[in-house]
Image (cartoon, helix red, strand yellow):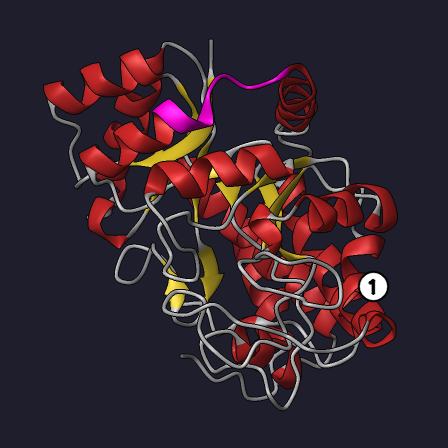
Amino acid sequence: MTRACILGCAGPDLSHGEAAFFAAADPWGFILFGRNVEDPDQLQRLTGRLREAVGRDAPILVDQEGGRVQRLRPPHWRDWPAPLDHVLAASDPIRAMWLRARLQAEELRAVGIDVNCAPTADVARPETHPFLANRCHGTDPGSVADRARAVAEGLLAGGVLPVIKHIPGHGRARVDSHRDLPVVDADRTALEDDFAPFRALRDLPLGMTAHICFPALGKHPATQDPALIRLVREEIGFDGLLMTDDISMEALGGTIADRTALAIEAGCDVVLHCNGDRAEMEQCIAASGDMGPQAQRRADRAIERRALLDGCDVAALDAELASLAVGVAHG
């Protein structure tokens, strides 16, 4: 049975030991980081070997948002500006976001990657922590929803699944959840603005939770709070496959096993573990268990949307994207 987790690997090559480990664990998918990326030929070999290890066309994820958060970089891949920088500098932000996502999909599919952990559908605010601020797509819910929709549709057109994040909203966080637990004291009425983009995108196939605490709504970080997961499912209406943000982030307390078990018990479908540490992955595998029937149904439905929808004239799309730029800053 497929385990309810997504795992990372240690480096640019898959050792025989790692391959055997993944074959026995059978995670739903894999995620890649900069440590796994050297050049297109190497990356294509690695994605092929990961799939060979589990004996199926497992999804392979990456964070290719742009700006600071992009794992594939020059000289072999484009240097994408941060999303907020790009939309603010584009004459037609929605078309620009579709074009860049379609081009990103072309780059990713060429090396065997079929899931991009984007778009970020959090609403940027004056208090948004710098780790997240320019990864957002706007400062009001409507613009965020429209631009994030364009990203998702551009990726899907190129056969790459989007992951909307960070449900139910991370924009009010004043601290970096990689290091600390953000606590947002806004009331339910105010938080509706944060939920709105995710509600508009609720039909998308994959979503990622926020490691963030909302005392007005629940007692625990959203990733581990049944009340918040019910809100995601019933009030926001998201019925895609729901993965956690990286379970090894320091916003969460306890062991990796504790963190994993709490997330699954709260209602997350799969747990994301990113750093490739074998001992931590063993804890994650043991605590995540097999994918349940509902999670498997959502996963199968997502995989059905992985098909390439259109061809791509890269030069024409590049030229059109360049024509929309009025001073795009990279970073």
Return the residue found at the far front. 219
x then y, percent, for residue 140: 78, 79
Task: Using the image as rendered, state which of residue 116 and residue 193 is in the foreground.
Answer: 193
x then y, percent, for residue 243: 56, 40
Q: Which residue is mark 1?
A: 196
Residue 317 in sight: no
Q: Residue at x 30, y 24 (%)?
A: 50
Give the image quarter of residue 61: top left
x then y, percent, for residue 209: 59, 51
Q: Residues within 10 Å of mark 1 (few under 14, many from 20)?
A: many
Image quadrant holding the C terminus, namely bottom left
Task: Using the image as rendered, state which of residue 251 and residue 32 is in the foreground.
Answer: 251
Check if residue 140 falls in the magenta segment. no
Q: Secondary structure at mark 1?
A: helix
Residue 289 in sight: yes
Check if residue 288 falls in the magenta segment. yes
Q: Amino acid at mark 1?
A: Ala
Return the residue found at the far left. 16
Task: Using the image as rendered, state which of residue 149 and residue 300 is in the foreground.
Answer: 300
Answer above or below: position of 198 versus 175.
above
Span colored in magenta: 286-292
x then y, percent, for residue 150: 73, 57
Answer above or below: position of 252 versus 69.
above
Q: Residue at x 17, y 41 (%)?
A: 11
Task: Using the image as rendered, state which of residue 218 and residue 230 is in the foreground.
Answer: 218
Give the total number of marks visible in the rendering: 1
Q: Residue at x 29, y 63 (%)?
A: 74
Position of 45 with respect to 144 (left or right) is left
Position of 109 with respect to 24 (left or right) is right
Give the image quarter of residue 126: bottom right
